[in-house]
Image: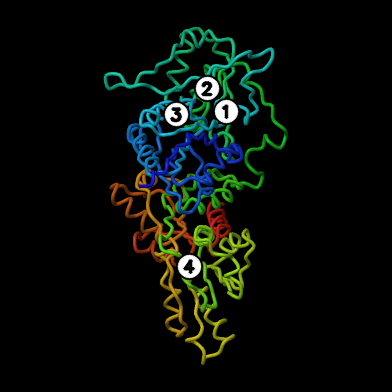
C-alpha cells in the first residue's frame, strides 16, 4: 500500500497592502499551493497569483467580527495538510507580529504537520515609512516599541492591556497596531501617565496603498482630529518625535491625482478577485475610496477539456475563463499547438488581454462588449465566410462560466449553427464575505455580472438588511435587466461594458 503524500503548511506573511511588497518566497508558494487560507487584511490581488484550481478559504478577522474561531482555523489547516496538500496560511503583515502565527505553528506541530514560516513586511515598519516616517532616526529615536491596541475580554467587558506608565516613559518611537477603536482611551492613558501633550503623533490609514491617508497632530489633539477627519482602521498609530518627519519625494506627497473627483466618494466593487482588482486600480487612480466587496469565487470544472478537433471557433466570454483554460491546458498536458488552425472569439478587451499575455491573439471581438453582440456578430461572420449551405459543418466551443448568458447559445441555435457548450468554471459565493459586504453602504456599488446581482440580493435577504443609500452601477444591459428584477430604484448602466466604461459612468454621475 502506497504511503500517503505528506502535506505542508506555509505560514506566509502577505505584507501590508502594496502587492509589490510581497517577498519572492511568498509569491512562489502562492503560485504552487493547493489551498490558501486567508485573512481580511490580506490584499486580494495576491489571490490572483494562485492557480485557478486552488481552493481559497476566507477566515477573515476584523475588530468585533470574526469569521472563524482560531481553533476552527487550526482544524482547517490540519485537515488539508493531512490530505497531502500544500497549504498557504496567508496573513497580513508578518505572521509573528500580532498575527497569532505562533499559535498556529504549535497547533500544526502538535498534529504532526510540517510547517514553515515565511516572514512578511510588517505594517509596523512599512506603513510609517510609506508616510515618510522612519521609526528610528539618529538624534530623535534610538529604538522602537511595537504594541497592539486591541482590548482583551474580562468579565464580558473589553479592557486595554497596556502598561501606560512604561509606554509614556519611552524615549524612542511607539508604534501601535490595531488601536483605532480605542484611540481615545490610549491617548488618555498616555497623558495620565505623564506623556507630553505636545508629542508629535501620526495616523496612517490604509498605508502603502493608493488610498493611503496620513494625519499628523500633537498627542493631545490626535484623537479628536482623527474623528473629525474620518480616520478608521486599518491604520497604524505612531507616537514620538519621528512622527513630525516627512521623508518623501515631491511626487510621493500628492496622494490623490490633480484630476481627481470633485468630492470624495466611496465605491464598493462586487465580483471575482480579478474584476475587483482591475476596477479598483482604475477607480483609485482617480481618487475614489474603493471598498472590496467581492464575494464571488472561481471553481474550475473538474471534467477534462473537450475535443475541439472538428470545431472552427473557440469562444471566451471572460478573463476568468481564459485563465482557467490556460491552467487546465497545463494540468492536462495539452499542447498549445492544438490551437493551430482554430479561430478565437472574445467578448471584450479584458478577455483579449489575458489571451495575449500567453501569446494568443483573438480573431474576433464585437464592437459592444456583451454576450448578445458577441453572438450576433460572430454568427454573421461565420455565415458570411462559410455560406448558408454549410451550417452543420461549422461549429464553435463556448468556454465560459456555467452560469453564462443564454444569448450566445440562443442566437447560434436560431441561426442553425452547431456549437458545443463547455462550462469551464462555476461561480460560487463566500458566505462570510457576502454577509459582511451586504451590510456596507458606500456611495456606489458596482456589479460586474447578472449572477453577481442575484447573489448580492440573496445575501441581503438572508441577512435581513436593506440598502437605501448606495447607487447601484451595472456593467451592461444584461446586468441591468437582472437588477430590475430586484429593485425599482434608479441605477446607472455603463455605456461600454468594460472597467473603463464603469469608471466613466460613475465619474460623470458624481461630478
Residue at the front extreme? 1
On the image, numbered disc 2 is attached to which residue?
222
| Residue at 63% in and 28% down | 129
Is residue 46 something one can see in this rendering? Answer: yes
User: In the image, which disc is placed on residue 67?
Assistant: none
**Separation of disc 2 and disc 3 at Cα?**
31 Å
| Residue at 29% in and 47% down | 463
Which element type, helix, strand or loop, lies under badge 4? strand
Please report whichever mark, 1 or 2, sits nearer to the chain's N-terminal start.
Answer: 1
Which element type, helix, strand or loop, lies under badge 1? strand
Q: Are marks 4 and 2 in contact (CB under 8 Å)?
A: no
Front-most of residues 113 and 445: 113
Is residue 265 something one can see in this rendering? Answer: no
Q: Do the residues labelled 1 and 2 touch (CB within 8 Å)?
A: yes
**Separation of disc 1 and disc 4 at Cα?**
49 Å
Tell me the mark number nearer the camera, choosing from 2 and 3: 3
User: In the image, which disc is placed on residue 101?
Assistant: 3
Amino acid at each position: 500500500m502506497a504511503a500517503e503524500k505528506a502535506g505542508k503548511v506555509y505560514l506566509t506573511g502577505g505584507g501590508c497592502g502594496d502587492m509589490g511588497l510581497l517577498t519572492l518566497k511568498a509569491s512562489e508558494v502562492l503560485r504552487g499551493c493547493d489551498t490558501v487560507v486567508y485573512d481580511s487584511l490580506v490584499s486580494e490581488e495576491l489571490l490572483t497569483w494562485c492557480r485557478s484550481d486552488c481552493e481559497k478559504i476566507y477566515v477573515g478577522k476584523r475588530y468585533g467580527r470574526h469569521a472563524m474561531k482560531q481553533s476552527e482555523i487550526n482544524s482547517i489547516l490540519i485537515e488539508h495538510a493531512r490530505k497531502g496538500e500544500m497549504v498557504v496560511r496567508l496573513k497580513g503583515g508578518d505572521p509573528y507580529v500580532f498575527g497569532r502565527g505562533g499559535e498556529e505553528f504549535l497547533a500544526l506541530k502538535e498534529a504532526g504537520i510540517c510547517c514553515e514560516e515565511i516572514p512578511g513586511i510588517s505594517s509596523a515598519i512599512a506603513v510609517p515609512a510609506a508616510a515618510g516616517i522612519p521609526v528610528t532616526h539618529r538624534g530623535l529615536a534610538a529604538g522602537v516599541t511595537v504594541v497592539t491596541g486591541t482590548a482583551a475580554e474580562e468579565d464580558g467587558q473589553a479592557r486595554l492591556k497596556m502598561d501606560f506608565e512604561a509606554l509614556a516613559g519611552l524615549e524612542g518611537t511607539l508604534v501601535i497596531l490595531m488601536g483605532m477603536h480605542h484611540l481615545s482611551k490610549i491617548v488618555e492613558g498616555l497623558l495620565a501617565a505623564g506623556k507630553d501633550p505636545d508629542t508629535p503623533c501620526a495616523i496612517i490609514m490604509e498605508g502603502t496603498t493608493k488610498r493611503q491617508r496620513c494625519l499628523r497632530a500633537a498627542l493631545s489633539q490626535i484623537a479628536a482630529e482623527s474623528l473629525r477627519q474620518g480616520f478608521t482602521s486599518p491604520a497604524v498609530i505612531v507616537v514620538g518625535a519621528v512622527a513630525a518627519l516627512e521623508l518623501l519625494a515631491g511626487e510621493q506627497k500628492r496622494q490623490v491625482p490633480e484630476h481627481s473627483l470633485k468630492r470624495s466618494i466611496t465605491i464598493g466593487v462586487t465580483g471575482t478577485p480579478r474584476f475587483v482588482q482591475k476596477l479598483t486600480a482604475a477607480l483609485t487612480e482617480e481618487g475614489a475610496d474603493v471598498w472590496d466587496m467581492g464575494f464571488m469565487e472561481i471553481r474550475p470544472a473538474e471534467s477534462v477539456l473537450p475535443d475541439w478537433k472538428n470545431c472552427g471557433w473557440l469562444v471566451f466570454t471572460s478573463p476568468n475563463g481564459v485563465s482557467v483554460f490556460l491552467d487546465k491546458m497545463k494540468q492536462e498536458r495539452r499542447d498549445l499547438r492544438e490551437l493551430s488552425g482554430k479561430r478565437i472569439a472574445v467578448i471584450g478587451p479584458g478577455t483579449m488581454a489575458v489571451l495575449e499575455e500567453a501569446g494568443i491573439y483573438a480573431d474576433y471581438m464585437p464592437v459592444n462588449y456583451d454576450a448578445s453582440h458577441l453572438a450576433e456578430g460572430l454568427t454573421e461572420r461565420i455565415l458570411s465566410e462559410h455560406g448558408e449551405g454549410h451550417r452543420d459543418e461549422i461549429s464553435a466551443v463556448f468556454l465560459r462560466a456555467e452560469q453564462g448568458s443564454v444569448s450566445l447559445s440562443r442566437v447560434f441555435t436560431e441561426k442553425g449553427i452547431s456549437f458545443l457548450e463547455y462550462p469551464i468554471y462555476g461561480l460560487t459565493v463566500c458566505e462570510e464575505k457576502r454577509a459582511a459586504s451586504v451590510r456596507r453602504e458606500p456611495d456606489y456599488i458596482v456589479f460586474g455580472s447578472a449572477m453577481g446581482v442575484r447573489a448580492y440580493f440573496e445575501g441581503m435577504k438572508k441577512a435581513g438588511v436593506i440598502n437605501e443609500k448606495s447607487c447601484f452601477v451595472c456593467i451592461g444591459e444584461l446586468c441591468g435587466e437582472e437588477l430590475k428584477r430586484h429593485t425599482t430604484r434608479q441605477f446607472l448602466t455603463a455605456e461600454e461594458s468594460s472597467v473603463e466604461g464603469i469608471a466613466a459612468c460613475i465619474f460623470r454621475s458624481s461630478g
